[in-house]
Image (tube, helix red, strand yellow):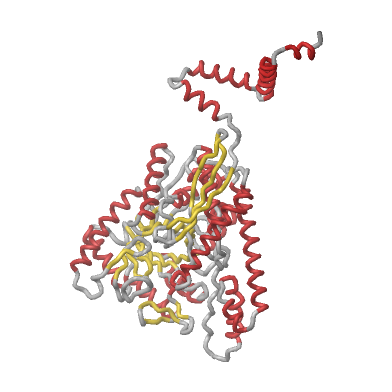
Amino acid sequence: MSYRGFMSRVPKEEQDLYDMRTAAAEFYRVNGVPQLIERALNELFFHQPEDVHGYLANYFTNLCAPLRISRLKGREVYDARGQLSIEVEVFCIVCNKEKSMSSAAVSIHFGLKETTLVWSQERADHVMTAAQWINGPLNNMLKDQNPCDQSDVDHILSNFFMARFLEEKNIQKEKEESLSPSEAELVLSSPLSAQTKNKKSVDKGKKSNTVEKPFPPAEPPEPVLPGSSAIGSVSLAVAKTAAEIQGIPLYKYIAALKNRKAPAQFHIPVPLVTLLSCGKTSPGKLSLMKEVILIPKAGQRVKQIITMILELQKEMMRIMNTSTKAGATQAMLCDSGALAVTYERPEQPLDLITEACTNSGLALGTEIHLALNCAAPELIDCSKGKYEVATGVLKSPDELVDMYQTLISKYPAVVALIDPFRREDIDQWEKLSNIIGDSYSLLSDITFKSKAPPLPGVRGHILKHIHETTVSDLICITSEHQGSVLMGTACSEPCSDDSLSDIAVGLGLDYVKLGGLSGAERMTKYNRLIYIEEELAQQGILVCEEKHPPPLFTDKPQEQSAAAESTI
């Protein structure tokens, strides 16, 4: 009897069971299941673990298919200031089930525009566009991508952003060409049209017959493309996912990306802590000192630094509460997490800190030093060609040079000035640099100008992780400015994301500026820095930086450039 004839007499249930067993045997054979189970049982017997099922679970988990991104989810959240922000969540298929791997958010920062009335609506449009990008095109483009290939992911994100940027630029150009002169003037207020508008003002200035050297016109502001924060947020979330997959902290993952391999040792960046704020939004007349920053001596533990500064702040509060001096009675917390104090003259906050240090037994100028974030670009009155350093007090760029010289001569503990001028005042940057010499550091914020020509005399650069800046961008920028970059926070920080501390450690930076010692969004980052330091110490791979004298960055600008070129 033939096989077909025999099977035709077998009951249908038995035939189905036979076919199923045959198919199962073939499936197991093709996938090597019997050999895998045999090896697993041999390993199990050899190790004889206490948790048998846990051991088998881990064994087979390690044999899972490589994780791929299954989808992205973008959602609107609120930041530390109660303003709309964007957060992205990354999902992967793990053991045949979709799992949320990580979430991340980067700061949204509009610079000087944040003081305008229309800024709130622009921010809402920005966040809405970011959510649409994440849940739409970016989700489709990154589906099935390997989250451990940061370079490829960031390349996709950057190409997408550039395509959107050029598309928006062409739209603006077409609008300008089709509108009447009066209507075109309104369009020119758009960030993407600022370069065209500024070029006209430059040409107009060249036609002037004035004998005086013309006041340098403002450089066009860097455009903030609506939705751009989706790029930085996705990049960071993917990096956190890769670190999770590899079972390592984010800082070790970033360090391996930058150095092409995991470094054998790490050091903790020295935290620069904001003590006081006497900037443009402070309650007093003084506007010149957006931040008075304490620079602790290198080699101390982060917790030790924070404890010291908290005690110093208590003494400062005691002095302000008991003082009868004019302008020293009002204080409030500002966005930087520091006290915004009512003062009229730049000497007053420095006198307060000096007195508090003396009373606390701290050697100001030896154990600790100070840096001043002048934020001068926020104070310029272009119509008058002067800086409004205090309410009703205007200083020309040259007068500001003299003011800085007097200030640092009187207070030698001040060893660094951040953004003392606009970028356009090249002559004053050079003049101040020549006056203060090698004992002081000039720093500039390169968050929006990372590819701009270097300013004369600048030794250090401040970089914020915002908008379309990817993890690969951070690595590239810090490599180009090797040894002269410190990471800083923006005014509007995500509430619970502590990634900035990991990024600063992973990039091997010497300093990190996290703001004042208040607010969950800042203390979360300080606590993370403490945790990383303790973890590295326990593992025996923490290296304490040598105690070096001020200023912040000791190498001259040309030496830094040469070092960066040799590194690249």
Residue 539 image offset from top left, x and y in percent:
42, 37
- Tally of numbered tags: 0
* 40 displayed left or right of 301: right
Along the horizontal axis of the image, is 295 left or right of 211?
left
For the point 63% across and 19% down, the residue is: 35
Question: Which quadrant of the view contains residue 531?
Answer: top left
Q: Quadrant of residue 189?
A: bottom right
The quadrant where residue 10 appears: top right
Q: Find residue 199 and report its horizontal and vertical position in percent.
A: 61, 78
Which of the image's four quarters has the N terminus? top right
Residue furthest top as drawn: 1
Residue found 39% across the figure and 61% down from its top: 81
Q: Residue at x 70, y 19 (%)?
A: 19
Image coords of residue 331 (percent x, y): 28, 67
Q: Position of residue 135 (x, y in %)?
A: 57, 52
Residue 168 visible in the displayed image: yes
Residue 538, above or below 52: below
Along the line of sight, which residue is nearer the eye, 72 or 378?
A: 72
The answer to whether residue 549 shows anywhere in this view is no
